[in-house]
Image: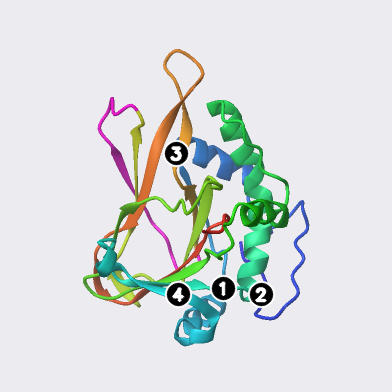
Amino acid sequence: MTLAVQEGFDFTPRADTAPEGTDWHAVATSLDRYGNAILPALLTPAQCDSLTALYADDVRFRSTIVMARHNFGRGEYRYFAYPLPPLLDALRHALYARLAPIANRWHRQLGIDEHYPDDLDTFLARCHRAGQTRPTPLILRYGSGDYNCLHQDLYGDHVFPLQVAILLSAPERDFTGGEFVMTESASSGSSAPRAEVVPLAQGDAVVFAVHHRPAAGKRGGHRKVAMRHGVSVVRSGNRYTVGLIFHDAR
């Protein structure tokens, strides 16, 4: 499944097909079961290379984080400034529209009294009224020996419970190691965490739970499962990833 969006192209996604070709029932089933789902070939190799090249363009970004300074791991990431590159802005809007119904269902199952609007702009307006005005989409760069500690991307009171990471580099060609890793554990601490490695090819995206997800309880209903994500040690080469977070930051 390829989303044919080029830099500068005015992409207006159709509500019934965006991103085109995705089996959203299968995505929802995987998210319910594992807390993650793969969107294969979301971007073309050329689109991946174009986004990777943006990393060196300082005017595109509002800040740069060196992970070792904050005990986040090793590596570096840069938060985009508004306006976002057209490709990422289009993807962010299209993906949010498909993920909002899943997010709302999860909140109903967990008894959380917060409803997400159908469109991203309305949700971002809610974030901005609460003082969360800084854009959160980012590019992450890892070199040999770099890694990302398990974490959650929260940023404020208004948190969209799903986010997307898109692998821009080609495994085994551009880098080795550097697997996307998730863990889940019962919020009560009653069981040991479960870890999962999510295999990605260049251009693949993974949709995953930011903070927690509902899981079927033994006595009916749903219990809250805590989720974290990270990246294992890059053994060689350079690994670039785009992160699409749907809530903005304080």
Q: CA distance from mark 1 to mark 4?
A: 27 Å
Q: Which residue is mark 3?
A: 212
17 and 189: which is toward the camera: 189
Which mark's residue is nearer the viewer, 3 or 4? 4
Q: Are marks 4 and 2 in contact (CB under 8 Å)?
A: no
Compare marks 2 and 1 and give the one earlier in the sequence.
1
Where does residue 128 sit, x and y in percent of width and height? Answer: 63, 57
Q: What kind of residue is marked 4?
A: Ser
Relative side of 192 to 1, left or right: left
Determine crowd level at label 1: few under 14, some 14-19, many 20+ residues with C-alpha closer than 10 A.
some
Which of pointers 3 and 1 indicates the residue nearer the eye? 3
For disc 3, the neighbor class at 10 Å (few under 14, some 14 to 19, many from 20) is many
Is the Cβ of the residue at disc 1 closer than 8 Å to that at disc 4?
no
Is residue 155 rendered to the left or right of residue 117?
A: left
Q: Percent position (x, y) of residue 196?
A: 33, 46
Query: Which residue position is annotated with label 4?
Result: 63
**Which residue is under mark 1?**
44
Contact, mark 3 vs mark 1 (Cβ under 8 Å): no
Spatial CA span between label 2 and label 1: 15 Å
**Mark 3 or mark 4, earlier in chain:** 4
Q: Which residue is mark 2?
A: 86
**Quarter occupied by the N terminus:** bottom right
Q: CA distance from mark 3 to mark 1?
A: 31 Å
SS under mark 4: strand
Magenta stretch encompasses residue 199: yes
- Residue 9 x, y percent position in the rendering: 72, 78
Location of residue 84 by image quarter: bottom right
Q: Magenta span covers which residues?
A: 188-203
Q: Residue at x 36, y 31 (%)?
A: 187
